[in-house]
Amino acid sequence: MAPNGDGGGGCRDVLEKLTPSRYAAAVLLGGIVIGASVLALHLGYAPPLAGLRLPGRRKKRPVRVYMDGCFDMMHYGHCNALRQAHALGDELVVGVVSDAETTANKGPPVTPMNERLIMVGAVKWVDEVIPDAPYAITEEFMNRLFNEYNIDYIIHGDDPCLLPDGTDAYALAKKAGRYKQIKRTEGVSSTDIVGRMLLCVRERSSGDHHTHSSLQRQFSHGHGPIDDGGSPRGGTRISHFLPTSRRIVQFSNGKSPDPNARIIYIDGAFDLFHAGHVEILRLAKALGDFLLVGIHTDQTDRSSGYNRGAHRPIMNLHERSLSVLACRYVDEVIIGAPREISKDMITTFNISLVVHGTIAENMDYIKEKSNPYAVPMDMGIFQIIESPLDITTSTIIRRIVANHEAYQKRNERKEESERRVA
């Protein structure tokens, strides 16, 4: 017998004691086990490791990133920034700057804190919101972000963010090595949107003094603003936004409704996408499984049925579409939806219910010569839902008009700041 040091001796002893029939069975069983193992590896199957902790392996903690802002008159540029920020980590925490700090650093906000919180919380890339965040990242707040909120990186766009004294609001985060930068979305800003409305005010007020009521009438009826080249036109100031299919795909959910899904349809202009829009979309989504939103063309929004004037909409069709697509309650949009909902449209999109809020720019649709909701009404699939907030696009415009001088100065300060940096 081989000495104890011979590693194969013990195995030979066992095999010598087996009868020929048992030896054949053992070989056959071993072949089956080896064959099954090779097949499993070939098919990509791995045995479950549930409850098994491998040496040196720990559960990976999600990377948490932080981005802050005033998010006043929130638009698709804000949403695209949040989308990019989320892509730099696993969870996105967003700080919304308080009304007081926004006023001190940028001028009075058009939308108050409660509305801005609704808007930010509704963006589908946002996981958590911190209200009343400071405008500047102080050392105390930065340590709170790192220790209390487990933030790994602080994110901001590549546009300048300067304090009134000219210093960088993110200097401490950069010094700590915990700062990452994203690309700013060109062609839109809150300053630009306010400017589109103030353009009407400047044209009308040059040469004579206007009261708030006359300015409101101007926005109500429209008076042919000019485009960036100075030529008159019967609509809003030309936007610098250039839509691409790639951007739409980035904002889209990319999913279709299940065959038996209850599809809810709501339509409108959704101009200057605001908290009132968000809340009615939230209630609409709760009525079914899939929310389809129809967004009317610019021409439809200027039509006599709306009676909003030639200057509307403030945002063009593709700008409005991206803002709606970024909302977590929305599953799909129809870009350039028809004003009238037909039987063919209901069948094509398998719409189960058409809804409309109680607060809207035009609540006289039933009195119109051609009621756009006549077909779903006749089919018994039309429902009015109570709007949670008494806000419309005209509400936002009235806020601008009522305090247009302050917003004019705010825009001038912003433009001067950007010129200094450039």
Image: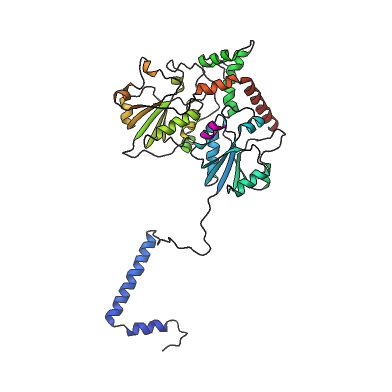
Q: Residue at x 55, y 20 (%)?
A: 398
Asked whether, in this view, residue 198 is left or right of residue 333, the answer is right
Instruction: Residue 209 in the image: state x and y as whole percent.
Output: 63, 11
- Quarter occupied by the C terminus: top right
Instruction: Residue 67 in the image: state x and y as whole percent.
Output: 58, 40
Extreme residue in the bottom direction: 1
Q: Is residue 152 visible?
A: yes
Extreme residue in the left direction: 21
The magenta region covers 113-118
Q: Quadrant of residue 164?
A: top right
Look at the picture and state if 357 lies above or below 254: above
Q: Say which of 185 and 414 sits in front.
A: 414
Q: Quadrant of residue 92?
A: top right
SS assignment for the magenta stretch, majority: helix
Q: How is the image coloured?
A: rainbow
Instruction: Residue 242 in the image: state x and y as whole percent.
Output: 52, 29
Q: Say which of 365 and 84 sits in front.
A: 365
Q: Residue at x 65, y 26 (%)?
A: 410
Residue 233: say if magenta: no
Instruction: Residue 364 in the image: state x and y as whole percent.
Output: 40, 17
Asked whether, in this view, residue 385 is left or right of residue 210, the answer is left
Q: Quadrant of residue 44?
A: bottom left
Q: Say which of 369 and 245 sits in front.
A: 369
Look at the picture and state if 201 lies above or below 337: above
Q: Say which of 133 and 264 sits in front.
A: 133
Asked whether, in this view, residue 41 is left or right of residue 260, the answer is right
- Quarter occupied by the N terminus: bottom left
